[in-house]
Amino acid sequence: MHVDYSNFIRTLGEKSDQPNATFEALFQLADSTIGAKLFTLTVIDKTRNEARRVYTNMPDAYPLQGTKPMIDDDWSWQVLVQHKTFVANSIGAISEVFSDYELIQSLGCEATMNIPIVVAGEVLGTINCLHGAGYYSADRVQRSEALKLPGALAFLINLNLSQGELL
């Protein structure tokens, strides 16, 4: 499988509008690699035990605001502890893990893939891709591996800039 990283790499080098420009380029890369109707990036803060959305391609439905507490459940065990990608290919499976399943379904999405981005043994965040029912096949899950390195770069830029440090 060939993945075209050229736009992501070019955007990564831009000085203005970071980290948003890199987040947008990551969305474009994810959409062309595995497909995503709804795409969000979530930062995980283990010290506060909360998650915060830092990017969305649908700000009207999923705005960038506030935080939500992390819950100890099967999803968090799989993604945050085992560092494994979570896939649910039906709205029923999604409803078992996400309370906003009705909103997800109203956007034409009934499948989700949550890809943990792990650096130095810690989950910095998740890449969240949603699409139609049954969409995230084993092949697409395999192809999602190509998003982990660009995802790590995007989350590290975000972390660096949120701490007020220059790159």
Image (cartoon, rainbow, N blue to C red):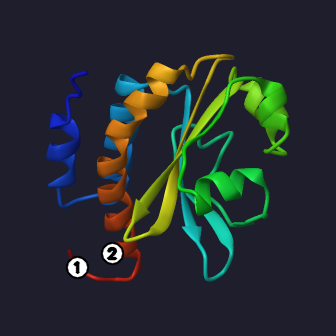
In the depicted structure, whether residue 58 falls above or below residue 16: above
Quadrant holding the N terminus:
top left
Q: Are marks 1 and 2 in contact (CB under 8 Å)?
A: yes
Residue 166 is left or right of residue 93, and the answer is left
Q: Which mark is residue 99?
A: none
Which three-letter amino acid code belongs to the residue tagged 2? Asn
Q: Residue at x 71, y 51 (%)?
A: 75
Depth order, front residue of 50/76 = 76
Q: Residue at x 54, y 48 (%)?
A: 84
Element under label 1? loop
Element under label 2? helix
Q: Residue at x 57, y 66 (%)?
A: 44
In the depicted structure, whether residue 149 falls above or below residue 5: below
Other residues around mark 2 within 10 Å, as few (<14) / some (14–19) / many (≥20): some
Residue picked out by circle 2: 160
Quadrant of res 163: bottom left
Depth order, front residue of 137/106 = 137
Residue picked out by circle 1: 166
Give residue 123's position: percent from left, percent from top: 50, 64
Depth order, front residue of 62/70 = 70
Quadrant holding the C terminus:
bottom left
Q: Residue at x 65, y 61 (%)?
A: 65
Q: CA distance from mark 1 to mark 2?
A: 7 Å
Quadrant of res 10: top left
